[in-house]
Image (tube, coloured by chain):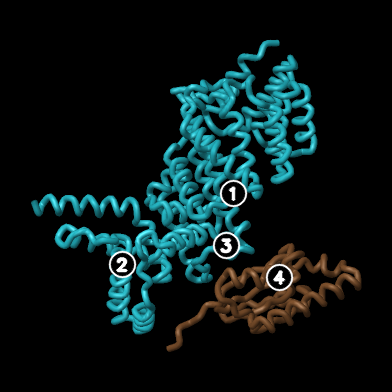
Chain colours: A brown, B cyan
Amino acid sequence: MRYLCLIYDEEKKLGGMSKTDSDAFMGEYFAFTEGIRKSGHYLAGEALQPVQTATTIRVRNGKMSTTDGPFAETKEQLGGFYLIEARDLNDAIQVASKIPSARLGSIEVRPIMEFAKV
Amino acid sequence: MSEDVGEGARETVEAVYRADSRRVLATLIRLLGDFDLAEEATHDAFTVAVERWPREGVPANPVSWLISTGRFKAIDAIRRRARFDASLTEIAERLEASRPDVPEPDDDSVEDDRLRLIFTCCHPALTPDAQIALTLREVCGLTTEEIARAFLVPPPTLAQRIVRAKSKIRDARIPYQVPARAELAVRLDAVLHVIYLVFNEGYSASSGASVTRADLSGEAIRLGRLLARLLPEPEAIGLLALMLLHESRRAARATADGEVILLADQDRSQWNPEQIAEGASLVEQALGSRRFGPYTLQAAIAAVHAQARDAAATDWAQIVGLYDVLVRADPSPVVELNRAAAVAMRDGPAAGLALVDAILARGELLDYQWAHSARADLCRRLGRTADARGSYQRALELARQEPERRFLERRLAELHD
């Protein structure tokens, strides 16, 4: 079963890291990604640019509006994701708990909705 | 003659339902992989038993008979529905093909299924409210109405909570299994927490006019017994001991008209000696394991109280010693407050008051009524009446239950300048 692990971090906290710390943090991410590739959990994963680059789009009554910024202003911001293949929720939780940001921010684990093939 | 046989068989069905319907359900959830389907199948299996046992006699192994009957009924039901929804055919075929391991009497696999059910209902991915509702419904077999009444919530709210929890188990694929060794300690904590919440809800209702709701406490003790038998981990045994030792004081902890009686003032001849004996022996068993934790330590403290003739004869030094260990094992300001009360009994009220004031000075427990009533009591014993009055008044502002309010009002009225 597939799960999406949404990674939430405080951009301020990450931005405030020293060069050494942030290099070490990135190193942990590379090691983690390598680990879940080997274990067969990895399907996809990306990091996102900061929320200041976000644009939110709405179409109402056929008219489009665009606003600068994320959908919701929150203390922690969506900063990236992994799409994983896991046996069940326990397996997915085990994987998500090892994402480096789990220690600083939080990881939201969401099962992918599978539509029956017609 | 045949009518007697029929009557006997009907009684047997009822007895098996009371004793084993949860076992049948737990195994059917594993075989069918779906809570709702398994509940329906359990119900259907007992319906068939009511029809057939009086005619054909009670099977040699009623539980395995019910499990395989329930499984066939479920496959039938899926096949019928498959006429309208072709995607179900595959599910029915898969279920039919899977070899049902029909359990022998006392088979370990049935007991494992009960444990799987407990761990699934208490999965930390479910909200605590949902864990409690689901456990009482599925593991204990209480009706939705009974649970709603016990927790003072409208039945539709409770029903919704259970439906949502079951959907999450299915859609997020919460596995039906006992956690692996590495996770066991953390996951067991969650189960113990649910059981203790149920017990406390019954022992000291969080609001309303009645201080006790004995049914819920009894249910929690039954559940604690089941868990301690299925998984004899020290903390499971410690929690069972703790609940039994609290429960042993039920008759003595309030007057007939519901007034609170403090531990020191309780008529100890009303304490239940069987529950104390069982609780104390479980405490020893858990302490002997050397892998005990907070529940066992609290039970050990309760056991010291239970074995004292009166408050003065209590071994306060031993209680303070146990609190010292508990503060390290499970640091919390409430535990510190209880330790302060024990220190006051060992070393006098001034020593206790210094500790209580230190906790309050840290800004902790300021909204906890028992911190203020404990402080008031120590000030009263030191003759500091004005301070005692202020603290009783603060406690009164925070108290939610009527009997507790009356108790504090009585204490206030008894103060003399």
Chain letter for mark 3: B
Q: Amino acid at mark 2?
A: Gly
Chain letter for mark 2: B
Find disc 3 in the rendering and name its residue: B125
What is the CA distance from the residue labelled 1 to the residue labelled 3? 25 Å
Q: Which is nearer the eye, B46 or B291?
A: B291
Does B382 sit left or right of B175 as displayed? right
Q: Residues within 10 Å of mark 1 (few under 14, many from 20)?
A: many
What is the CA distance from the residue labelled 2 to the residue labelled 4? 41 Å
Residue occupying the point 47% across, 45% down? B220
Find disc 2 in the rendering and name its residue: B70
Q: Residues within 10 Å of mark 3 (few under 14, many from 20)?
A: some
Q: Which is nearer the eye, A62 or B159?
A: B159
What is the CA distance from the residue labelled 2 to the residue labelled 1? 36 Å
Chain letter for mark 4: A
Of the numbered discs 3 and 2, the one sitting upstream in the chain is 2
- Figure check: B212 above or below A64: above
The local secondary structure at tag 4 comes to loop
> Do labels 2 and 1 touch, CB within 8 Å?
no
Q: Amino acid at mark 4?
A: Lys
Does B332 sit left or right of B147 as displayed? right
Image quadrant of residue A52? Answer: bottom right
Find disc 1 in the rendering and name its residue: B234
**What is the number of the mark on residue A98?**
4
Residue occupying the point 65% across, 31% down? B370
**What is the number of the mark on residue B110?**
none
> Do labels 3 and 4 touch, CB within 8 Å?
no
Q: Amino acid at mark 3?
A: Ala
- Residue B66 placed where, x, y %? 30, 63
